[in-house]
Amino acid sequence: MAMQCGVFMTPYNPPSRTPRQVFDWALDIARICDEAGYVDFMIGEHYTLGWENIPMPEAIIAACAQTTKSIRFAPMAHLLPYHDPATLAIRIGWLSQVMEGRYFLGVAPGGHHTDAILHGFDNIFELPPRQLEALHLMERVWEGKPFLEKGKYFQAGFPGPDTMPEYDVIVADNGPYGGRDKLEIAVTGLSMSSSSMKFAGERDYSPISFFGGTPQMKAHWNTWADAMASMGRVAERSRYRVCRDVFIADTDAEAKRLFLKSGMAQTWAKYLKEIYVKFGLFDGIIHDSGMDITPAQVDADFLAEHVVLCGSPETVIEKLEKLADQVGGWGQIVANQHDSLDDPKPWEESLRRFATEVCPKVRMPNLETA
């Protein structure tokens, strides 16, 4: 089984972009990725972040379904504490039926305090229990059996004979396409001590790891695999996804030149670097590099060499195989989308070459199991 490729649209478009520009850009990228052979297209859900402004990923998913043929889509992730669980469960099930199997689900509690404030919370620390209760109620709705339940935070139910009005009502089947067992649920993790990986393993959800160096990748895999084993399940490497920044061109020098003037470089300079420095997310990558620098000293050259999969197809293959030998392998590399509206051709070409010239050729150890 060859390594698969996916794309993650956070979206990492500058705050100056209009919602229509971001929406249309997503449709363009989805079409290109579908034609190139990408397997998955994941779309973030954020409400207040200027650099990550997609508050309604399902709208993009539905639109992309009309112009693509085989690529799967997922909201990554629906922030469950901010949704009514019964309504969301029905919308997820209905959209998965519309997509006829080209849909999977991402869930999260919400990790940005500005989104929490928008929804009336003082901080993000009170959100995880709400996510657990929302998931519980969503699962009950998907069972399609009569119930009424009032929880601590939410309430939900499902109609049955005892709750019908005095006439027959045909209840719509808005459960997940093919049944609940066919609905893949995935969870993302970023920090090395991410509790999301344990949460995912305990529930048989798929893990998605944002790259933070080999110590972090090993920790993510081990946490997920141990949690899977604790529930009597086998952790399959083919289910493990890793998110990376990617920029490919004919030569290493050309790839670096194009990267340095790209929207990806702009995102790192104006947005992501500050976040990575503040939360210690460069630490594992600096450790791998062997360089004696502080996170604040990370510059564009360091990013091109150690953070971004930047280079010719041959160089990127070599980097991926070296990393796989160190951490044990994975099933899918997910390319993070970055704004390239002002000069889209190099980015589009990089996406195509990653899918056609890199992923099929990467030698991946231990793809099936730990």
Image: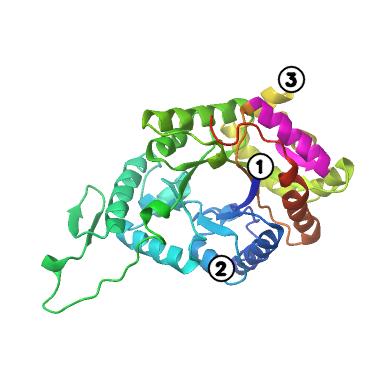
Residues marked 2 and 3 touching at CB (< 8 Å): no
Q: Closest to the observer: 293 or 219?
A: 219
Percent x, y of residue 126: 34, 41
SS for dot 3? loop
Which residue is the site of mark 1? 244
- The answer to whether any part of residue 273 appears in the image is yes
Q: CA distance from mark 2 to mark 1?
A: 25 Å
Q: Is residue 164 left or right of residue 328?
A: left
Among numbered discs 2 and 3, the one appearing first in the sequence: 2
Q: CA distance from mark 1 to mark 3?
A: 23 Å
Label drawn at residue 65: 2
Magenta span covers which residues?
306-326
Gap in Å between the C-alphas at discs 2 and 3?
47 Å
Where residue 2 appears, as percent x and y from the top left, is: 66, 44
Seen from the viewer's position, the closer of residues 191 and 244 is 244
Residue furthest out toward the front: 1
Q: Is residue 324 within the magenta segment? A: yes
Choose between 227 and 251: the one closer to the eye: 227
Name the quadrant containing residue 32. bottom right
Name the residue: 74% across, 49% down: 354
- Judging by the rendered image, the residue that carries numbered circle 3 is 292
